[in-house]
Image: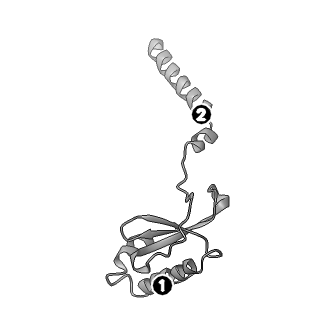
């Protein structure tokens, strides 16, 4: 009976040592952020856009940007609103569309893709 306890205890102690030796800082260092490294100053047609989010320099990325997502799932990097007026217009357009889709409970062709993103 004692011979069965020793191997089990050895495995437990080895596993415990492995867990304690791996630091959370090392684990987080392996996570890669998906950041815009450059932005395009070319205006984006609003009919191809689905949503957006803002990238903030202090959150691990090297620059501020607005990241637009197209209906085909492509992410396009644009300058912040303070640098490009057209970006602000697109954000206002997408915010209005999202608000209208929420009001109609995501009925209609333009709202179907937003339904899964907003839930």
Residue 102 visible to an observer of this rendering? yes
Quadrant position of the C terminus in the picture? bottom left
Comparing 60 with 1, the one in front is 60
- Image position of 78 with respect to 94: above or below: above
The quadrant in which the N terminus is found is top left
Q: Residue at x 57, y 80 (%)?
A: 88
Q: Is residue 106 left or right of residue 77?
A: left
* View extreme (left): residue: 109
Q: Which residue is identified by label 2?
A: 22
- Residue 115: x %, y % from top left: 39, 75
Answer few, some or many: residues within 10 Å of disc 2's Cα (few below 14, many 20 plus, some between 14 and 19).
few
Furthest-right residue in this view: 58
Residue 101 horizontal side relative to residue 65, left or right: left
Where disc 2 sits, the SS reads loop
Q: CA distance from mark 1 to mark 2?
A: 46 Å
| 79 left or right, relative to 114 | right
Please state the horizontal and vertical placement of residue 45, each as a whole percent of the image.
43, 78
Mark closest to the chain's N terminus, 1 or 2: 2
Residue identifier under label 1: 99
Does residue 34 lie above or below 109 as drawn?
above
Say which quarter of the image contains residue 46: bottom left
Around disc 1, counting alpha carbons within 10 Å, would you say few (fewer than 14), some (14 to 19), or many (20 or more)?
few
Q: Residue at x 51, y 72 (%)?
A: 42
Q: At x 39% / y 70%, what residue is drawn?
A: 116
- Determine the residue positioned at 62% across, 56% down: 61
Q: Is label 1 in a helix, a strand or a loop?
A: helix
């Amino acid at each position: 009976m004692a011979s069965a306890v020793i191997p089990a205890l050895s495995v437990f102690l080895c596993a415990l040592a492995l867990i304690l030796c791996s630091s959370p800082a090392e684990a987080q260092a392996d996570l890669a952020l998906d950041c815009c490294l450059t932005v395009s100053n070319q205006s984006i047609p609003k009919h191809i856009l689905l949503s957006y989010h803002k990238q903030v320099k202090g959150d691990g990325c090297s620059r501020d940007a607005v990241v637009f997502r197209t209906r085909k799932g492509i992410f396009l990097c644009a300058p912040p609103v303070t640098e490009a007026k057209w970006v602000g217009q697109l954000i206002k357009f997408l915010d209005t569309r999202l608000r209208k889709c929420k009001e109609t409970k995501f009925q209609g062709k333009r709202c179907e893709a937003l339904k899964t993103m907003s839930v």
